[in-house]
Image: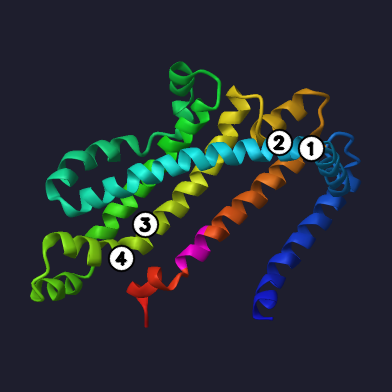
Amino acid sequence: MNRIKSTLPALGVIVALLFAWWGAIVATQSLIFPTPWQVVTGAVELLADGTLWRHIGASLMRVGTGFALAVCVAVPLGLWMGWVRGAYDTLNPIFQMLRPISPIAWIPIAILWFGVGDASPIYLIFISSVFPMIVQTTVGVHTIDKRYLRAAENFGVSRATLFTQVVIPAVLPQVLVGMRIGLGVAWLVVVAAEMIALRSGLGYMIMDSRNAGNRYDLVIAGMIIIGVIGLSLDSTMRRLERIRWVRWRYAQ
């Protein structure tokens, strides 16, 4: 019941926006921009012929692959940089220089190196999500309460045991925050990459709908679907943050 009550304000805003959208179309008598109902019928059309599922599956596959590769690289590297001072001093300036570069700027390089297949967007997803996770994981190690480390040292635990039994559990909340940020950026980047270099995925669907007869109902439908999937991915990551053995560091 509490969860339903908490969603009512958001639902109210969505309904108000839909009425405002419909009213604007009626007032301007636009012949190009679609009404909400036209967007719904366009989405149903794509669902009926299976096109929408194919594009969603292609985008999710690319995001899943690139993001998984980024996690496998970023988390161990971030832990290492946070734990070993020399690694941090050596690598941090490089990552801080690369991190502000827009993922979109890497598109020409990705096409040059990997062509116009799936490898290009997977690389772009990797390069866009790996840096936030490295930085967040490193910061997580650096901000561990020193009491945990001193308490473990007082019991005479080895450095390896200290790292596996104290550091890694303590840094998990920060790792998940980095993963959440990286996943959001990854979902944003794959859509942009598909608009330029591919023939499948939600980004391609939007551009193809625009070019093939000005189907703006399908363009808007694709944009809304991208937003809904992005919200679902973010909600999934937030649920992981609530796991008890992840939140132990912040227990009251």
For discs 3 and 4, the disc positioned in front in the rendered view: 4
Tell me how far mark 1 sits from mark 2, CA to CA. 6 Å
Q: Residues within 10 Å of mark 2 (few under 14, many from 20)?
A: some
Name the residue that disc number 3 marks.
175
Q: Is residue 35 left or right of residue 144?
A: right
Q: Residue at x 84, y 47 (%)?
A: 40
Secondary structure, mark 1, is loop
Q: Is 238 a magenta residue?
A: yes
For discs 3 and 2, the disc positioned in front in the rendered view: 2
| N-terminal-most mark, 2 or 4 | 2
Q: Which residues are magenta?
A: 237-241
User: In the displayed structure, would residue 33 be above or below residue 181?
Assistant: above
| N-terminal-most mark, 3 or 2 | 2
| N-terminal-most mark, 3 or 1 | 1
| N-terminal-most mark, 1 or 4 | 1
For discs 3 and 1, the disc positioned in front in the rendered view: 1
